[in-house]
Structures are given as C-alpha cells and as structure tokens.
Amino acid sequence: MKSQAAFFNGLFSGNSKSAEMRARSPFWVMVRKEVADQVHSWRFIILAGLILLTFFGAMYVAMANIGKVTANPGDPDGSFLYLKLLTTTDGSLPPFHVFIGFLGPLLGIALGFDAINSEQANGTLVRLIAQPVYRDAVLNAKFVASLIVISTLFLSLSLLMIGGGLVITGVKMEPSELVRILCFVVLSILYVSFWLNLSILLSVKFRQAATSALTAIAIWLFFTVFYQIILNLVVRALLPDPNQLSQEQLMSYNDIILTFLRLVPSQLYTDATTTLLMPSVRSLGPLTIEQMAGAIPAPLSLRESLLVAWPQLCGLIAATVVCFALSYYLFMRREVRT
C-alpha cells in the first residue's frame, strides 16, 4: 500500500507530466504563437488603444455624474452603483457598452480577416500542414488565440472599472452587480466572437486578405448604417401609416419592425446589454397599459433579466456557431497546395 506522501508525489508528478504534454501539444504551441502575434501587431495595439480611450472617457463622464444619478429617488436602478458606471452619461459621450457595440466588430474583424489567406499567400500554410498537425487544429488555434486576447482585454477593463469604483467611491459591491458585470463581459466577448468568426470565414473563402477585410467591413457598414435606412424605406412603402392605426394594429406594426431589427447582431447585443445593465428593464418590446397595470417599479432579479435577454443571447450564439461551422467546413475541403 502506498503511503500518503507517495500518493501525493505521484499525483503532482502526473500533473506536471500532463502540463508538460499540454505545453508540447502542437495545438497549444500554435495558440501561444498566435497570441504573441496578435498582441504585438499594430492593428491590435491601435484598436485596443481606441477601446481604452473610450473606456476612460466613459468612466470619467460616469464618475462626474454618478452622484446625481444615485441621489435620484425615482430611479429604481439607483442602488446599483457599479452598473451605473457602465450606463451613466450626460450626453457628451455615449456609455461604454455603446462604444463596444461600435468598436467591437472592428476588433473582431482586425483579428481574423487574414487568419488563413495570409498564411497561404506566404506559403507557411503548406509547411504547417506538412507537419504532424491536424488540419482543424490550425483553424481552432486561430480562433482560440483571438478569443483569449479578446477575453483578456474585456476582463481587464471590467476589473479596472470595479477597482477604480472601489477606490474612488468606497462603496461595497453587491454580488448581483458582480454577476451582472461578468455576464456583460461574456456577452461582449460573444458579440466580438461573432465578427471574429465572420472574418475568419471570409479569410477562408477569399485568397486575398484585402478582399476579405473589405468584405467584412462592408457587411459591418451595411448592418450599422444602411440596414435601418432600407428597413424604414420598405416599411413606409409596404405598411400603412401608423397615425391611422388602432392601438392593437400599432402594437403589431412595432412588433414587425422590431423583428426585422433583431436580425442585426448589434441590435441583439444592445437589447441584451440594456437588460443586463439596467435591472428595471422588464421588456424589450412595446407594452400596453393593461400589461403594465399593477407592475411595481422595482428592479428584476438576475434570473429574470437573463430570461428577458435569453432570445438575444441564443441569436448571437447561433450566428457565431454558424460562421465557425461554415469556415470549418470550407477549410477542411480547401486545397492548400495551390
């Protein structure tokens, strides 16, 4: 029978062996190399600098106005000080989550638009596949490395916001606030991951990095600027004038517009972040007076907020999985020797 010391020695040596094998795994070697390349690239440094600049600007505006907001007795979210740091603004700058909704897609596109086609153009993809490495490990390593970089950036900013809030205000954070902020971080990572997977898909599809970058930016511009304009034109041409509709018809009219707006990833992200960071939000659609009758103006629990935002979360997850599956399918069938 082994002694307890021998048991623990074997346990620790087993862990060290598994850690050593993990360190020598081709997949993790490629992940470490990709993380180093991403962190040292100028495009990541510039975009991370922009996000940091907007973060500090939004936090400065929120700190300057946090006293007025929390002193308002009519605000049901006034007791959530740290959530207010992410949502408070005086109109001079948008809150931080609005900046993420705008800059997050650019970060995802910058990290993935040349993931595969640049390797093939430089001739390194053929050399890499010639090694004893699974082909899908190359694509997975590209995605995991970019995901690690994005997660580290957003988690660091959130911890910086929490630490700064603790030092400046001295107010203790409630556990529900911490969980909501972590959910916001996960949601932001998921949102940027969608654009990252879309740009990786385009890098697999197109052989030129410039073509995949321009296509990804064109898709982002379409959904950010032109989609709402086209939707308004179509609605005015096909649907009746809302001023001549009854209340029930007006509700159906708004539901139709919201349904088409929620085909856009940024709208899904905005709806979900609004629900998570503002606990008093009870619905993401129009409500009738009968539905609001008897409702107490109090914040929802975290579980209820997640239930309200669950369709938006599922939509973002589905879009991300579809883009990754398509890029995986195309890459596994791609001829890399030409």
Image (cartoon, rainbow, N blue to C red):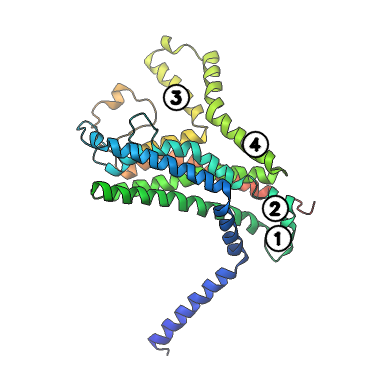
Residue 233, located in which quarter of the rendered image?
top right
Classify 10 Å Cα crowding around label 1: few (below 14), some (14-19), many (20 and above): some
Kindly identify which numbered label has been placed on residue 128. Answer: 1
Q: Are marks 2 and 1 in contact (CB under 8 Å)?
A: yes
Dot 2 falls on a residue whose secondary structure is: helix
* Position in image of residue 13 (x %, y %): 48, 80
- For discs 4 and 1, the disc positioned in front in the rendered view: 4
**Which of the marked residues, 4 or 1, is nearer the chain's N terminus?**
1
Q: Is residue 278 visible?
A: no
Q: Amino acid at mark 2?
A: Glu
Q: Which residue is mark 4?
A: 214
Q: Do labels 3 and 1 touch, CB within 8 Å? A: no
- Residue for point 53% across, 40% down: 105
The residue tagged 3 is 255
Precedes in sequence: disc 4 or disc 2? 2
- How far apart marks 4 and 2 lie (CA) works out to 18 Å
Residue 29 picture location, percent across and down: 60, 64
CB within 8 Å, label 4 to label 1: no
- Mark linked to residue 83: none
